[in-house]
Image (spheres, rainbow, N blue to C red):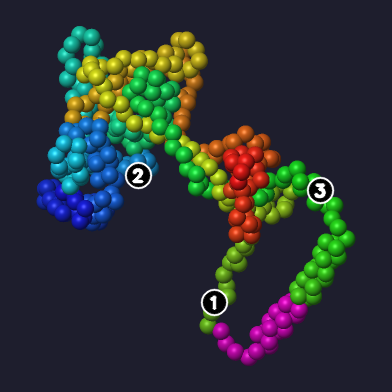
Amino acid sequence: VATRSGLTRYFDLRDPIEKQNFTAEEIFADTHNKAVDETFYQRAVDYYQIDANAFLFSVPFESHEVLPKHVTASKALFFGSGNKKAPAAVTGVLFNHAKFADYFFSLTKMCSKAECNGQNCTKGAINCYLLDNNAFVVVSQAETETGKFIGEIDSNLLKSLVEKNVFKEIEIFDYQGICMKDLNEKSVDSAFEPIRTPFSIFRNIVIWFFSQIYTIAVNLMITSFESMLTNAEYFSDYDTDYATHTSGFPKDEKGKPMTPNKTKPYPCDKHFNLYERQKWQSSDPLRGSYKKCDDDECGQDYYVQSIENTNLMLVVIKTADESLCPCDEIKEKIAPEKINYGGSDDEESCEEKLHFIDRPEKPRSRPNLPCVNSHPEI
């Protein structure tokens, strides 16, 4: 039980053998004690507006990199009357992910109807997924897909689910984003760098002259210091019989040292898409189809069934023959991308120039840019 004051109650119901083999990261009370700042708390409160009676099942996002050990099922408790309600607490349970997945796949084997034809989620040309309300995988036949975004597994399936109004696509904008510019890339202006003024040439000569004097002075100091150490009468206990370490950058095909790419951050606008499950008016399974490839013979049928009183949905895909569809699935990741306002790669657009206006050094006036609206009397 978690409230605004923190994690109020926590009961460890594991058997004594499991408690003896625990590790520090497995203690939920120690790692998830921030309550309102925890993901399980925030998601349960948000999902209450969609389904007040549902439990929200979740696994850590991108948990395929480290296979998840637990599933969290949480439910928000609101108190009040009418439309005036406020979240008071979130209650839930944490249980083993492997046992949850095994129980799910065992249920899919109980179909005794003739149309099942002995097929289930563990064998045959069928892929089964348990998706949460944001289109992330909670249970899959491939453990490495757990916690992945379904669009990263099969983007065409996601597009079909959006067309069927199973998920709603929500575009998110970030107007305070940071982009990185590669300083090693040669632009068109770099071709005119050799054309310099006499003053810049003279300045470079002076800088080169003093840098050479400084280098010679440092070398003389190092040489004199080494001679003092060589001629000194002393005994050293340090072992000098060791392999020398050669440091430096790797070399390219021409034998020149390869320097790391230099980047420069600059402000930019970004956008990305998130997905939210929509309410279903019917409890019957939804049937659909989509093409894995451009070929007409690469169509794949699927069924979607909402799981009552949860945020989960079962997606069953009847996969096509790989010999007829040799292409790979199109994948789509949830990653912020820079918004291109119409300018080319070498020319900044009007909106991008707004980011680089030096505000402190200029008077408080309207920027002289065509994309800035203003009243003629101002």
User: In the image, is 357 to the left or to the right of 74?
Assistant: right
Relative to 324, 212 lies left or right: right
Judged from this view, the residue extending furthest toward the front is 377
Q: Which residue is mark 2?
A: 66
Q: Secondary structure at mark 2?
A: loop
Q: Amino acid at mark 2?
A: Val
Q: Nearer the viewer, residue 375 or 144?
A: 375
Placement of 365 over or under 270, stated as above or below: below
Q: Is residue 313 left or right of residue 250?
A: left
Mark closest to the chain's N terminus, 3 or 2: 2
Q: Secondary structure at mark 1?
A: loop
Which region is colored magenta? 217-236
Q: Are marks 3 and 1 in contact (CB under 8 Å)?
A: no
Pointer 1 residue = 239
Label 3 packing within 10 angstroms: few (<14), some (14-19), many (20+)? few
Give the vertical position of 31 relative to 120 (above or below).
below
Question: Dominant secondary structure of the magenta stretch?
Answer: helix
Q: What residue sits right under mark 3 in the picture?
A: 192
Residue 315 falls in which quadrant of the image?
A: top left
Tell me if I can see residue 360 in this picture: yes
- Rendered residue at 52%/38% (across/down): 337
Give the distance between the C-alpha atoms of the residues marked 3 and 1, in whole angstroms. 55 Å
Q: Residues within 10 Å of mark 2 (few under 14, many from 20)?
A: few
Q: At label 1, which amino acid type do we have?
A: Asp
Q: In the image, is residue 226 part of the stretch drawn in magenta?
A: yes
Q: Can you see residue 122?
A: no
> What's the CA distance linking mark 3 and mark 2?
51 Å
Which mark is nearer the camera, 3 or 1? 3
Q: Earlier in the sequence, mark 2 or mark 1?
A: 2
Of residues 202 and 72, which is closer to you in this image?
A: 202
